Amino acid sequence: MKYILLTFYISISTTNIFLFSSIEQWLIQSDFSWTISKITPYLLLIISGILIARWVSKFFFFKIISNRLKFLKPFIFVTITAIPFVIGFALHPIYEGDFSKQGTTIEKFQPIKDFKDVDLAVIAIPGCDYCYHSIAKLRQIKSRNPKMKIKFILCSSSFAELKDYIAEGGNTVKVTTTRNIESLQNLVEGKFPTFIMLKNDKAVYRWSNDQFGCMAIDHLESELSK
């Protein structure tokens, strides 16, 4: 029975490591907060590590380690506990900004046509991989918040450059060009993509790409749901 438990704990840990992203995405789609969804897979790895370490401590150490070596038990316990988390972290690292919330309040910016009837605007430029890949996150936000009006604004006057972005956005994210290129570039201080929260057609808050983490998205959803 005791070895069945060990196998079960290791199986939980291994499954969590290989289905790490799937667990996070399932939680997001199930309307858990972005922060909880991001943290949960890491917590599960820590819990499974503790269970494995307790099993090893209970059924292994007391039998084979002499009294003189028992001082090693806490060290080995912590090491075993950490192994699943370390492996999971190596395969799914936490990047700078993943848990970020900090952005910048927009004090003065003249309303422009691009922001009319929009809740979240993303300012992007052609040829920017980060800008293109941000659309996937926008689709997730939209699926959780069907009433949120999201607009992806490409700082370009060329409609030909929209093709790939429109295909990625599908029917979920509106993609447009703009004539206010200079104004928008000044607003985002040359950082692309930048995420702009709007209220009553006015830009009120912005996050650069490395600031728009799970806590920032939770804040955005909370503010726009009021």
Image (spheres, rainbow, N blue to C red):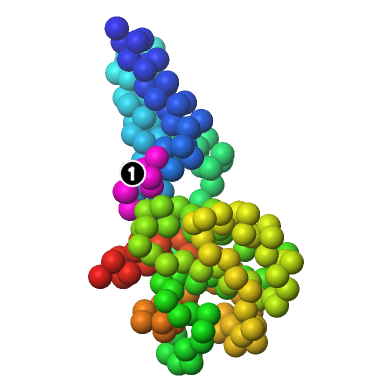
Q: Is residue 18 above or below residue 30?
A: above
The quarter holding residue 162 reads bottom right
Q: In terms of image quadrants, where is residue 44?
A: top left
Name the spot of residue 197 as percent of width and height, x first.
Answer: 42, 74
Which image quadrant: the N terminus?
top left
Front in this rendered view, residue 210 or 170: 170
Which residues fall within the magenta stretch?
Answer: 26-33
67 and 221: which is toward the camera: 221
Q: Position of residue 65 (x, y in %)?
A: 38, 16
Task: From the viewer's perspective, tell me whether residue 159 is left or right of residue 65.
Answer: right
**Residue 35 part of the magenta segment:** no
Res. 187 visible in picture: yes
- Give the residue drawn at x 32%, y 26%: 51
Judge whether residue 74 can be spotted in this image. Answer: no
**Is 184 above or below relative to 59?**
below
The vertical placement of 49 against 10, above or below, is below
In-front residue for pair 207/70: 207
Vertical placement of 82 versus 221: above or below? above
